Image (spheres, rainbow, N blue to C red):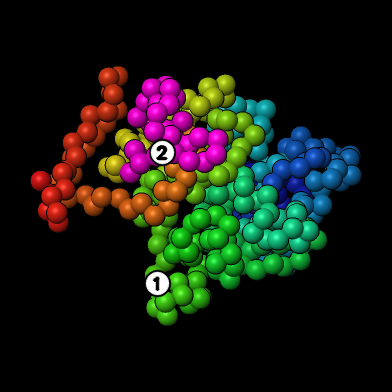
Amino acid sequence: MRLLNVHTLLLEEFNESKAPPYAILSHTWGEGEVTFDDIQDTSDKYTKKAGYEKIHSTCKQAISDKLEYVWIDTCCIDKSSSAELSESINSMFRWYEKAEICYAFLADVPEIPFRMSRWFTRGWTLQELLAPRKVVFFGADWSFIGTRAELNEKISEATGIDRMFLCNGEARDPHAFDHGDGKQHPSLSIHKASIAARMSWASSRETTRPEDMAYCLFGLFDVNMPLIYGEGQKAFLRLQEEIIKRYNDHSIFAWIIQNKLGSAKKHDDSVSRSGILALSPAAFSGCGSIISFPISSHSSPFNVTNQGVQIRLPISNGDKFR
């Protein structure tokens, strides 16, 4: 992986397992971002681009936090190499997870309220919110807004993610565990949430390219697969097939087809077109409270075949299953 030296502004390559401590940036892309080619330009013309201020401020904050390296997606990946781009996207959740700290830069705050920021609407920022051990939010002028632990109630309202999944390793703050009932609730790994619940977290988010709506969720489900730009919605179907191979979780079939007004459709031609798998995370809207059926002697593996899904389900009879 490549890291940017905060003192020299030069890219340095490291074996991931031997990478030094680093900070990582989470942001939404805008006009004039500094690219991989720009940062290697010895003429420093890139310092006049609009996106340079983000790089400068990220490095300045890292120095303040006594870190010598940062990772920024706009300039640390050579996107002209399809092989490198694929490797980076498949590794990105892990890179955010291993960072010492993540700086979440909200370019539209305080112009608009924190919970209304565009940052909460983008597909890629979902993993950037959940993967790191510590997330610190900054506004447009790089003024401190708060940490993920401190802002977890507002973040939960903005994203629909239960607060217990927002704590991660940073949260030893008791307020992060208090659900308003006076009790202390332990934080949970996001991988303890059902497939349907995790999908619901992405249901209102968007990506510039349709394939990225699937690719940005790799880390959320701990799966990997090749990138095929141009496949459109097939990417999300492939993602679900990979999830089925990995998890014995029936909630992946709990999606609902929505009409343009947001209500469920009882009859629609798109049902036959989509089959038993959803066409996008939007179909899981409202599934945030779904809990996976516990794996037991009643559970059996299921899989997708060329003739459909082979699955065996228990039948409920009161409080008993058979």
Residue at 21% x, 49% y: name it. 295
Taking depth in this image into account, of 107 and 65 the one nearest to the observer is 107
The residues colored magenta run 251-279
- Residue displayed at 80% across by 46% down: 51
User: Within 10 Å of the Cα at label 2, are there few (<14), some (14-19), or many (20+) other Cα atoms?
Assistant: some
Q: Is residue 241 left or right of residue 225?
A: left
Marker disc for residue 41: none
State the quadrant of the N terminus: top right
Q: Quadrant of residue 267?
A: top left
Residue 141's x, y, as percent?
A: 80, 61
Q: Nearer the viewer, residue 259 or 221?
A: 259
Q: Is residue 223 visible?
A: no
Point out the residue furthest to the bottom here: 182
- Give the residue furthest to the left: 322
Residue at image mark 1: 185
Which residue is at 67% across, 27% downward?
A: 80
Mark 2 lies on a secondary structure that is loop
Q: Position of residue 211 (x, y in %)?
A: 55, 30
Tag 2: amino acid: Ile
Location of residue 138 with respect to 195 vertically, above or below: below
Location of mark 2 (residue): 256
Identify the amino acid type marked 1.
His
User: Which quadrant of the figure has residue 192?
Assistant: bottom left
